[in-house]
Image (tube, rainbow, N blue to C red):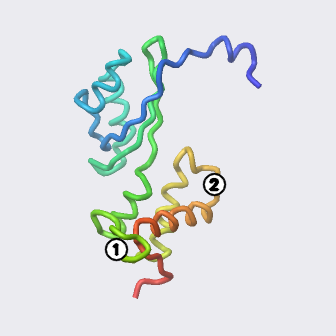
Amino acid sequence: MSTLKEILTRRPVAATIRLTVPAGGARPAPPVGPALGQYRLNLMAFCKDFNARTQKYKPDTPMAVTITAFKDNTFEFTVKSPSVTWYLKKAAGIESGSSRPGHVIATTLSVRHIYEIAKIKQSDPYCQYMSLESICKSITGTANTMGIKVVKDLD
């Protein structure tokens, strides 16, 4: 339950914007410019902050960002690590998954690959309270739907 002070100091939210922006590649051009411009947010401040937060990733890594725009033209944003499918494609060295998952196997990955991806995803704000085992199970399910077979050891 919120206290009276928290209720009075809350800023009214104008919108929640979800974008996928390349790491270190936020520019005032589309898709960032029009999405933030319609809420009169400071584009250059967002680009500068986003690029600073994502400098530890390789350039052009697709990053999911959630921007909360407030009615007083200020904003807050959170950056998530790249999607599990992106990590699986990079680990497997493929461009896309199987066209017929369950029938045609695109490639195989070892459990070690799944474990390493899970360790990276555990640092995500939405996965920080999940156990490593449950994250691994989720990633294995995603791999199966992409037509990637998970094996104990690669021979």
**Residue at image x 46%, y 84%?**
153
Asked whether, in this view, residue 9 is left or right of residue 89, the answer is: right
**x%, y% of residue 57?**
35, 49
Q: Which image quadrant for residue 103?
A: bottom left
**x%, y% of residue 72?**
47, 11
Task: State how many labels appear.
Answer: 2
Of residue 105 and residue 31, the one placed in the foreground of this image is 105
Q: Which image quadrant for residue 73?
A: top left
Q: Is residue 135 above or below residue 125?
A: below
Q: Tell me which numbered mark, 1 or 2, is placed earlier along the sequence.
A: 1
Give the amino acid type for the residue marked by disc 2 in the picture.
Answer: Met
Asked whether, in this view, residue 67 is left or right of residue 30, the answer is: right
- Tell me whether the residue at label 1 lies in contact with that at label 2, contact meaning CB atoms closer than 8 angstroms: no
- What is the C-alpha distance between the residues marked 1 and 2? 29 Å
**Quadrant of the snapshot with the N terminus:** top right
Categorize mark 1 by other alpha carbons within 10 Å: few (<14), some (14-19), many (20+). some
**x%, y% of residue 117?**
47, 62
What is the number of the mark on residue 145? none
Residue receiving disc 2: 130
Give the amino acid type for the residue marked by disc 1 in the picture.
Answer: Ala
Categorize mark 2 by other alpha carbons within 10 Å: few (<14), some (14-19), many (20+). few
Q: What secondary structure is marked by label 1?
A: loop
User: Which numbered disc, 1 or 2, marks the residue closer to the eye?
Assistant: 1
**Residue at image x 44%, y 76%?**
149
Q: Is residue 55 above or below residue 131?
A: above
Q: Is residue 42 above or below residue 147?
A: above
**Residue at image x 44%, y 17%?**
74
**x%, y% of residue 85?**
40, 58
Residue receiving disc 1: 106
Of residue 15 and residue 9, the one placed in the foreground of this image is 15
